[in-house]
Image (cartoon, grey):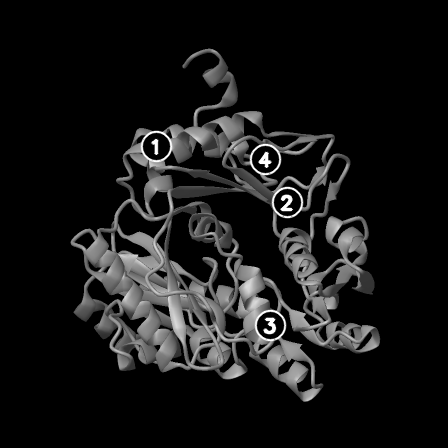
Amino acid sequence: MFRKILIANRGEIALRIIQACRELGIRTVAVYSTADRDSLHVTYADEEVCIGPPPSSQSYLNISSVISAAEITGAEAVHPGYGFLAENASFAEALEECRIGWIGPQAKSIRLMGDKSKARQTALEAGVPVVPGTTEPITAVDEAKRMAAEVGYPVILKAAAGGGGRGMRIVQDESQFESQLETASEEAERAFGDGAVYLEKYLVEPRHIEFQILGDRFGRVVHLGERECSIQRRHQKLIEEAPSPALSGDLRQRMGEAAVRLAQYVGYQNAGTVEFLLDQDGSFFFMEMNTRIQVEHPVTEVVTGLDLVKLQLKIAAGEPLEVGEGITARGHAIECRINAEHPETLTPSPGKITTFHPPGGPGVRVDTHAYEHYVIPPHYDSLIGKLIVHGADRQEAMVRMERALDFFVIEGVHTSIALQRQIIQDPRFRSGEFSTRFMERFRMIPAEAVAQGA
């Protein structure tokens, strides 16, 4: 096992990795920008190194600074968390050249599955169904229009090199095609430095289902069940749960087998997620693979009793995967992402937290780096923390989430708590019958109207 690792990230996920390392007796090195000097991951790490000013490009995305920090402190390996450099194959290769370990999949897997069009082609080769569309980035507009007409409108244009909703545009008919293609390509270029875009048939009412997989260096791959991720806005997830209320035992088995088959085909190692779109008729299609730990990994931890970050560390250290086959969910888990943003406009709300009282009680877990008087910087993601609840079944989990949201008090900045409380209470969410278009139809009731009984 490693004696010391560097965490190339910040905030909640950096603190989560430190917690896992403490239990394994591994010393930790935190890197931070000047904006994060007072962050808890800096406080709780054994060592810390400032790697630059607030802009990510000059700190958390600065490969040379991160590697220099690892070399100076004698870190044996780097854990990238999620975001920033987590899916950067060049970073993984640079670490290997410097003889520093990488707590993640091999660079070739990151590069292969990180390019969305290549990932689609790989899934086809592995016998995993994909949404009809192009297998290569669009190079000729007329040819792309012919493909769109063939698969049928609406279609969706997606950045080949990224995700998170950036470089993504829905085209309702041919008259919109060229303008939407230009917009998607320009946004992809700004976000990922690569304007390549591919095309897929747009499924009107799908569900977003992802399977957590783990693979070791000895060729063994297992899945740990699925997560339901359909509650999202602007292609960014708001609420996740496990297991999905939409999956039967047979469908779960077939989707899980497809996820494992793809991971085995690419020789995948460490933690990853295979994401699918589930259509209304029960057919499912490969969407993408995330070659890292996910924000929503705690819901899988809660229902399986496994520590995914510890497993990442053990796999990277060369230990065989000791997770048994056929893991089934125990009870039901729901996660709400608590963001520093206005609940109605969804605009970021950085600033100083004046009051911070997280909830507790049976079945409640809070993963956060925030605290009273902490100043949320404007330079990064708006995630304050994650509220996870566990119940014997979905009904108990929903009730516990309502209670936990009611007891979660954050003042000084706007947060998504009020929005998530209303989503949990929405009849469509309660029934479990929803799709990725849930938020398009959701209308938030202002807090003052709720107080007046509207």
Q: Secondary structure at mark 1?
A: helix
Measured from the top left, where is residue 5 in percent x and y?
A: 71, 69
Measured from the top left, where is residue 445 in percent x and y?
A: 44, 24
Mark sitting earlier along the chain (4/1): 1
As shown in the figure, which amino acid type bears the numbered disc 1? Answer: Gln
3D distance between C-alphas at marks 3 and 2? 22 Å
Q: Local crowd at mark 4 within 10 Å, few (<14), some, or many (≥20)?
A: many
Q: Local crowd at mark 2 within 10 Å, few (<14), some, or many (≥20)?
A: many
Foreground mark, 4 or 1, reads 1
As shown in the figure, which amino acid type bears the numbered disc 2? Answer: Thr
12 shown above or below 326: above
As shown in the figure, which amino acid type bears the numbered disc 3? Answer: Ile
Foreground mark, 4 or 2, reads 2
Q: Secondary structure at mark 4?
A: loop
Mark sitting earlier along the chain (3/2): 3
Per the image, the residue denoted by label 1 is 395
Is the N terminus in the top left, top right, bottom left or bottom right quadrant? bottom right
Per the image, the residue denoted by label 3 is 103
Per the image, the residue denoted by label 2 is 368
Residue at left offset 49%, top offset 83%: 108
- Left-right relation of 179 to 353: left
